[in-house]
Image (cartoon, helix red, strand yellow):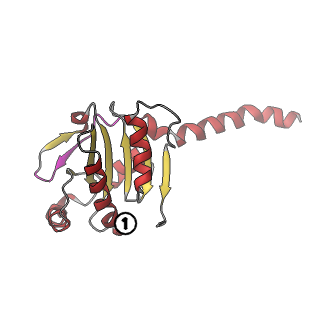
């Protein structure tokens, strides 16, 4: 019994550390993040202040991304006129910008696309280095949900609707994992 009691502070510290690491991405603010659009212009996430942002990390070589991008475009159309912005961040290598441009033209992607993101940034913000990954960001630049893997419409809608409704009701889970294709 005394052995357990002596270990209690250590176990409590470990539990606190694990909990803080699990939700660490939620405390990150993306306002200072700056990437470039496909024309080379700087785009600061602070430009989206006052908007909910659905920030999707993708790559031209990613199979699930090819299925997810049209779905994100359709969702963006449904939220048109509301303060919700859908933004794509390619993690393709900078020297492959022409491949990114060609892909966007072929797929008729109409969403804003940023380049210059990489696996390190993705992991720092979402807690994973796997694409696709989607962040739902509130109007103050705080990450409220990370979707690791291919995002389902309900994964995005649940968080966006909660934010649009003034964060009323139960908060959506901070993290959703969809590494395996689920229909």
Which of the pair 103/13 is nearer the observer?
103
Q: Indicate the quadrant where residue 141 lies.
A: top left
Secondary structure mostly taken by the magenta-highlighted segment of the chain: loop
Q: Whole-percent x and y of residue 88?
A: 26, 52
Badge count: 1
Residue 90 within the magenta-colored segment of the rendering: no
Q: Report the residue that reaches farthest toward the right.
A: 1
Residue at coordinates 53% horizontally, 36% vertically from top-left? 170
Q: Say whether residue 150 is left or right of residue 172.
A: left
Q: Whole-percent x and y of residue 79?
A: 29, 45
Residue at coordinates 82% horizontally, 32% vertically from top-left? 5
Q: Say whether residue 104 is left or right of residue 22.
A: left
**Label 1: few (<14), some or many (≥20) within 10 Å?**
some
Vertical position of residue 163 compared to residue 122: above or below: above
SS state under label 1: helix
Q: Indicate the quadrant where residue 60 lies.
A: bottom left
Which of the pair 52/12 is nearer the observer?
52
Q: In this figure, which residue is indicated by the disc labeled 1?
A: 64
Q: Say whether residue 56 is left or right of residue 112.
A: right
Residue at coordinates 25% horizontally, 38% vertically from top-left? 45
* Quarter of the figure that contains the N terminus: top right
Q: Whole-percent x and y of residue 7?
A: 77, 36
Which of the pair 109/56 is nearer the observer?
109
Highlighted range, magenta: 28-39
Q: Whole-percent x and y of residue 48?
A: 24, 36
């Amino acid at each position: 019994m005394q052995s357990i009691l002596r270990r209690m502070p250590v176990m409590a510290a470990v539990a606190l550390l694990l909990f803080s690491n699990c939700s660490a991405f939620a405390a990150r603010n993306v306002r200072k993040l700056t990437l470039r659009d496909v024309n080379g212009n700087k785009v600061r996430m602070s430009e989206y202040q006052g908007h909910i942002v659905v920030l999707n990390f993708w790559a031209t070589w990613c199979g699930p991304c090819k299925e997810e991008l049209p779905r994100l475009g359709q969702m963006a159309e449904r939220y048109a006129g509301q303060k919700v912005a859908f933004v794509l961040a390619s993690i393709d290598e900078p020297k492959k910008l022409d491949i990114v441009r060609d892909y966007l033209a072929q797929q008729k992607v109409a969403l804003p696309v940023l380049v210059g993101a990489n696996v390190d940034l993705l992991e720092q913000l979402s807690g994973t280095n796997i694409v696709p990954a989607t962040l739902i960001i509130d109007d103050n630049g705080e990450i409220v949900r990370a979707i690791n893997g291919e995002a389902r419409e309900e994964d995005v809608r649940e968080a966006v609707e909660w934010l649009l409704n003034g964060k009323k009701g139960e908060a959506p889970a901070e993290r959703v994992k969809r590494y395996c294709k689920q229909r």
